[in-house]
Amino acid sequence: MKIEFRKVPQTAKEFETEFNSVKLEGTFCKISPSLIKISAKMSGTTEIECCRCGKTEEYTLNEELDFLLSDGIFNKESDDLVIEIENNTIDFDEIIQNEIASLQSEYHYCSECETSTEAYEKEF
């Protein structure tokens, strides 16, 4: 789902998008001429690779997401996560794909490696 930045209403509007078996649903609204607030929940399952043995496991998602979208470069300090968008278009499908990719790039251990006491070589 895509929407032009200038067409985003100031009252909260609901959205829902899905990628593979992960669903992102919530609300979005314009809070200033150049900022949009998104409050959403990401749920479902995705494959995660163990960073120790390389085995893939299914990971259950149940994440609350709150962030801001900026129309172009964001120059002010903020405690919130601010995502700068290009082309004046918000692409919710791209947002969910990026959130999944971010999660998959983190360090995860499979259930076997988490409980294993076997020594392994660490790289520093």
Image: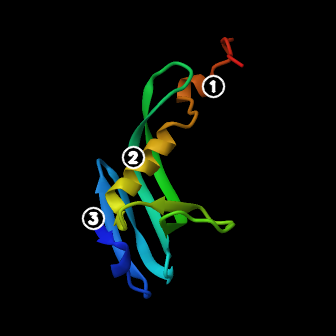
When the figure is inspected, residue 101 is found, relative to residue 74, above or below; the finding is: above
How far separated are the C-alphas under marks 3 and 2? 21 Å
**SS label for mark 2:** strand
| Residue 66: % across, % down | 54, 66
Q: What's the amino acid at mark 3?
A: Met
- Indicate the quadrant containing the N terminus: top left, top right, bottom left or bottom right: bottom left
Residue 63's disc is none
Instruction: Point out the residue furthest to the bottom here.
Output: 11
Mark 1 touches mark 3? (CB < 8 Å): no
| Residue 104: % across, % down | 47, 38
Residue under label 2: 45
Tell me the residue at 42%/28% (across/down): 56
Residue 115's disc is 1
Tell me the residue at 44%/42% (across/down): 101
Q: What's the amino acid at mark 1?
A: Thr
How far separated are the C-alphas under marks 1 and 3? 41 Å
Q: What's the amino acid at mark 2?
A: Thr
